[in-house]
Image (tube, rainbow, N blue to C red):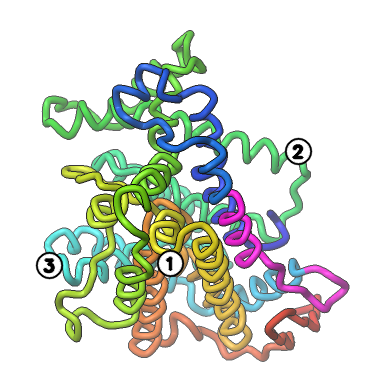
Amino acid sequence: MGKTIVLLDIVAFFSCFTCLFMPVISYNFYNKEYYLARAFKVYMHVPEETYFNYTLPALSAFTLAMCWPLKVNYAGSIRDFFKAKYEQISNQLRPHPYLGIQLVVVGIVMLYISAFLPSSVRFIGVLFYFSSFAGLLYIYLTPTVPYKKTLLVIIPLFTLGNALQTGMFTVVTYMSMTLISFFFIGNKASFLKKILLFITGIFLMILLQTVKGSFRKATWKGEYQGSKAVLFQELVSRQLGRSDLWTAKAFFPVYMRTNQGVNVSLVMERIPKRQPFDGGTYLFESVAAAFVPRFLWPDKPEAGGAFNMEHYAGVKIRGWATDIGPIGEAYGNFAVTGGIIFMFLLGGFIRLAYRKVLKVSIKTPIVVLWIPVLFYQTVFSMENDTLQVLNSLIKSAFFMYIIYKIYPVLFKPGTAADTNKVQVTDDYTSINYNPNI
């Protein structure tokens, strides 16, 4: 952090946290003997050895393929790549102080309009809203923006306020994880500060999970008529004041929300004992669906966990959402060895997409600021499914292309000469960096 964008590292960390670390907690604390885990059926459903003999090498392969370093041939550090991009972007945006504000305003307006759009095109409205976070980065890097510091405070506060109104904190949590390293590029931070930031982030996520259920219960049923911000503050204060904050019972909501291993273990318990491995029948159809528009394939598979949970795990879900994740799909289709290979290929695809963004940024530096739009749903890919990961990347890239064609100034706002020569190859990035840019 401070040297490069840690997007792929965050994806790897979140995947290992939900599919490896939390299952360890489950086997040792929240197992079938623990009354809450037994009551909600959120214990691990296969033996520990069986589970980790698959998931550990599968996630190792996924992480290896995804995080294989892009080597830099300039005095040895990729930090100069992003520092160079930032300086280019800042120079290009200088004559356009309102571009970022325009993106944010359009995104916020589309957030409210999207609620009235048909479900088939609602994702377009969502992408416009996600674009407001690219707009936030535009504002951050534009030296001529009026009231810049005020805007950099108000926009995140609006996002938090919207989360409080809806009770949905997904965007706040995962977009924060995606954006955080952007604000540290070029800023030196000691290792201690990075550790403190990491610990603070983890603590806030845990705190959010412990109060989220009570907050939704009070607001979604329409019984609470007061300020939701005040209610949330009261719940947080009450939670922090609990003497049993770190007990097993108090931590259970966090465990229940973050242990993706439970769903994977359901698949491993069911397949091949009760049904044979799928052999890629539905998964390959899902992969194809990510590349074909719905108007050409009206009944193509839809992203979401309802089908996967019933088909692979034998669990019908109604009124809430969960999924088996790509790692569960990989096992359900190809068993242990095939599942490991599939996870390696998926990690390689994500790395390839990220590398493509870097390559495009050679001629269009500002594309770097759209990484949160492109990869937002990839951050929590282990909670989704393969279709969702591929679908979000492809649709987001196509959305950016259309925006570029309609309003190219968003991507090429300046014509200043680029003195940085950058080459991205299959295995390295070479940079000739002029520090006087």
In the image, 251: left or right of 162? right
Callout 3 crowding tier (Cα within 10 Å): few <14, some 14–19, many ≥20: few
User: What residue would you read off at disc 2?
Assistant: 192
Q: Residue at x 55, y 33 (%)?
A: 24
Of 333 and 125, nearer the camera is 333
Residue 227 at x, y percent in the picture? 23, 29
Of 99 and 171, nearer the camera is 171
User: What residue would you read off at disc 1?
Assistant: 373
User: What residue would you read off at disc 3?
Assistant: 118
**Quadrant of residue 289 in the image?**
bottom left
Q: Earlier in the sequence, mark 3 or mark 1?
A: 3
Start and end of the magenta stretch? 56-77
Q: CA distance from mark 2 to mark 3?
A: 48 Å
Q: Does the segment drawn in magenta span residue 57?
A: yes
Residue 409 at x, y percent in the picture? 44, 85
Q: Amino acid at mark 1?
A: Val
Label 1: element kind: helix
Residue 293 visible: yes
